[in-house]
Amino acid sequence: MTLQAMTTSFFETLYPLLRRLNAERTISPGKMGVLRHLAEHGRATTSELAVAGRVSPQGISLAARELERWQFVVRVPDAEDRRRIWIELTDAGRQKLREESSAGHEWLDQAIRERLTPDERKTLEAAIPVLKKLGSDVSVD
């Protein structure tokens, strides 16, 4: 199999799984990425979030406003530079991140248990470090 064929097959295999897992979520993957980044790295500016998420500052600004409206984040002026505004995760945001992160896990647990043989489960387990290595440079989901 060529590298291009492997890449295509890999994407075509993962896409339906990701779509199924994301179907269980109530907020977009982009907003999940913002919440996850804040949980892992602490407060950030919209510019920092845009760079981390590889999206436009305008896109992050819109996402942050919506997350703020839902009370998952708050905007906090910098103590030294009033022009800088920090985006911080709230307790409600942490709870939402936990809920959304676990959405779809029950379906996946059941699918693995019912559809895979013990040998296939071992193969899947062995592939996890390889998949982590592929995604190791991604900072925001």
Image (cartoon, helix red, strand yellow):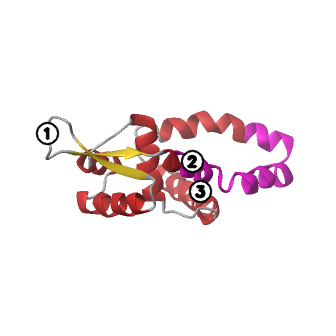
Which residue position holds label 2? 95
Q: Are marks 3 and 1 in contact (CB under 8 Å)?
A: no
Task: Report the side of 133 relative to 123 (left or right).
Answer: left
Does 140 sit above or below residue 68? above
Give percent across and percent down for residue 139: 40, 41
Which one is in front, 30 or 2?
A: 30
Provide the secondary structure element on which disc 3 rests. Answer: helix
Which residue position holds label 3? 14
User: Which is more N-terminal, label 1 or label 3?
Assistant: 3
User: Which is more N-terminal, label 2 or label 3?
Assistant: 3
Does 66 sit above or below residue 80? below
Task: Report the side of 2 relative to 69 (left or right).
Answer: right
Which one is in front, 113 or 81?
A: 81
User: Which is more N-terminal, label 2 or label 1?
Assistant: 1
At horizontal 50% and vertical 44% (from top left) the residue drawn is 91
Disc ID at residue 81: 1
For the record, the magenta segment spans 94-123
Provide the secondary structure element on which disc 2 rests. Answer: helix
Give percent across and percent down for residue 88: 37, 44
As measured in the structure, the alpha-carbon distance from the residue carrying label 1 to the one carrying label 2 is 30 Å
| Amino acid at the residue labelled 1 | Asp
Provide the secondary structure element on which disc 1 rests. Answer: loop
At horizontal 15% and vertical 34% (from top left) the residue drawn is 80
- Let me know if residue 113 appears in the view: yes
Task: Report the side of 104 relative to 119 (left or right).
Answer: left
At horizontal 83% and vertical 55% (from top left) the residue drawn is 115
